[in-house]
Amino acid sequence: MDEKKSVTTTTPLNKTQAQARADQVLAFRAEQQLLAEQGLLSLPDDQASNIRDYHNGLLQQLQQGLNIDLSDQARHLSLGMQIVSFLGATALAASLFFLFFQYWGYFSTLSQVALLVAAPLLTLALAVWLQRIDDSGYYAKLAALVSFTAWVLNIIMLGSIFNITPSPNAFAIFALYGFVLAYLLHVRLLLAAAMLCSFMFIGAQFGSWMGSYWVNAGEYPEHFLLASALFFLVPLLFNSQRFDGFAAIYQTLSAVVFFIAVLVLANWGRASYLPWSTGLIEGVYQVVGFAASALLVLYGMRTHASKLMLTGNVFFALFLYTKFFDWWWDWLPKYVFFLLIGLTAILALTMFNRFRATQQSKAGQHG
Amino acid sequence: MANPISKKLVWFAVAVVVLVNGVTFGKVFINRSATKAELALSERELRVPYQYGFAGENSGRRLSLKWTTPNPEPISDEWQYQYRHTSRNIALSELHFASFQFAPCQQQRFRRQQQNAWVLLEFNGQSYFDYKANAERYYALMHQANPELTAEVQLEQQQRAAQLMQTANEQATRLYVIDAAARPELLQTVLASRPATADSRLLIVPAVIQVGYSRCTDAKQLNPTEIIVSRLAVESLYVPKHLTQALPDNNGDMESEPLRATIHYGKLHEPWISSLE
């Protein structure tokens, strides 16, 4: 460790890639030690020393630059920290809301306005400062979430204080600030929040164009189909490799919104704008649901996106089971109904198992 | 933070906060730069909104507008009439109803058909006087001898009529939504032709309306142009700190507490409270 070699990587890695690289190094070391103990591998001392120094330098660089975990204990602690920081951010956001509501009546309008405008700016400055001094990034992300909450509070309370007519444009403003903070401080939770605000805004705009009041946008699921498809394409159109996990958030959240909309329409065609009978509308959306979820599973396998595969699987099962419910719940004895569900699950398990075996044998041949 | 993209994003975030707040204050300034209408409301038209158990968590104070729509039906002895102030239906002219372009009725199709609208608001005007006159006529009618009824029943009716008249004179709101259309220009002609007195006020404000419940049912012939005024776009008004002394401490029923509030409607049809006594 004393003589660290300068390590250069060909392309800048994101955190997931860096963690995979570190895991590879640690696995190599463990295997090398095992082989050496069994007398199967004996590297010359100078070569072993060179490799060790190179790996030490690499691990240190990755750890310092991207705060990766170098042991299982550290990995478990990191997961715990992520959960705690999410809970902390939610609690701090709620606290900020209630704090303001508890005392805002005691301030003059000028003081209220000053506080509301200053809050997102001060918390933004805090987040940027924390990012500089804290390598883990957890505290900066926490401050970013509080800044986003302060921004939402700013807009809502100004509307309340000055009796401004409510408008869906507020969601666009929330989304804009959310996206900026998400990209500035690499906060996936904020990216998800900004996407949800965008869905609300786009849905409300579609609702207004279709002649309804924007608050009722959620009652017409077709408002969200185009927006979810566009968000799904974002990682394909723009390279977001620098932003670890952003592509997964874009695609998984879009897919979830898309499938929820299709699932509602597949079972309640009355909420559709299509000028067909409700039976036909429901049938069309059922086909769309089955086809799209199966395609998502295939796409997830091809791109090695496990979350997308899981989303596709879950929604395919939901579409299937809601159809089973429609067909059989009323006229089959319940034990037969649940037996059929169980049998389809076993069938799916068998198919997945066979597919897994094929994949394993391919991997073995490549090895 | 040495990354130039990060620096740009920080400045962009600051610009978003400053610009959005600037535009908001600009709109507030434009709205309040001129008063389109000034209403002197009392506890009859104002109430403290219900806070769903969060009154203890919220130190801010608000007042909600109480309004109603004209009732074309004659006053009856039915108990429902006592609750008529909660009704929010209006039958529109065909022109005004058509301006909303409601989607045609379709079987097995869900349509809430709620949309933005402009409504004509009348304070202390013809609609209120009609209601008061109706209550007085009803009171006079109930005090005429009716040999078909027993003395006990007649006394009960007279008491109810007296109560109704007292409500009309002292408690009922004088704020009425009398017309609605998709565009404010359509309401201007109604506003110009509406009889007005020195104490009455007419103004056009944004609201949310929905089509009448009977439109897509067999009863549609009865009220083919009926709509329901769901709410005014701004129905709850913030009370600034320097005016809160005039409000009762409790957040409950305010009807017994005398109150005088001056409400202004600005250029952008958004209201504010300028005085409270």
Image (cartoon, coloured by chain):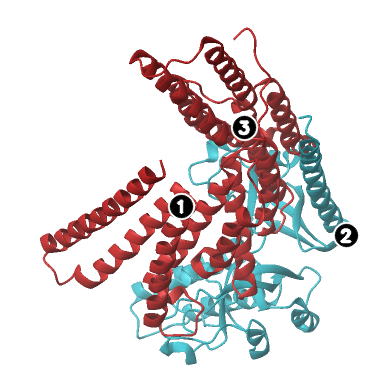
Chain colours: A red, B cyan
Q: Seen from this angle, which residue lies furthest top? A: A2
Q: Chain of mark 3?
A: A
Q: Respond whether the residues carrying marks 2 and 3 are from the same subunit.
A: no
For badge 3, the amino acid type reads Lys
Instruction: Classify mark 1: residues with Cα within 10 Å, few (<14), some (14-19) or many (20+).
Output: many
Position of the C terminus of chain A, as image quadrant, is top left
Looking at the image, residue A330 sits to the left or right of residue B74; the answer is: left
For badge 1, the amino acid type reads Leu
Q: Seen from this angle, which residue lies furthest right? A: B33
Q: Residue at x 29, y 49 (%)?
A: A357
Q: Chain of mark 1?
A: A
Picture quadrant where residue B241 is located = top right
The residue indicated by pointer 1 is: A308
Q: Is residue B47 visible?
A: no
Q: Return the residue nearer the eye: B214 or A119.
A: A119
SS at mark 1?
helix
Mark 2 → mark 1, Cα distance in angstroms: 56 Å
Q: Return the residue nearer the eye: B17 or A255.
A: A255
Q: Is residue A314 visible?
A: yes
The residue indicated by pointer 2 is: B34
Discs 2/3, front: 3
SS at mark 3?
helix
Picture quadrant where residue B178 is located = bottom right
Discs 2/1, front: 1
The residue indicated by pointer 3 is: A141
SS at mark 2?
loop
Percent position of residue B63, x then y: 64, 51
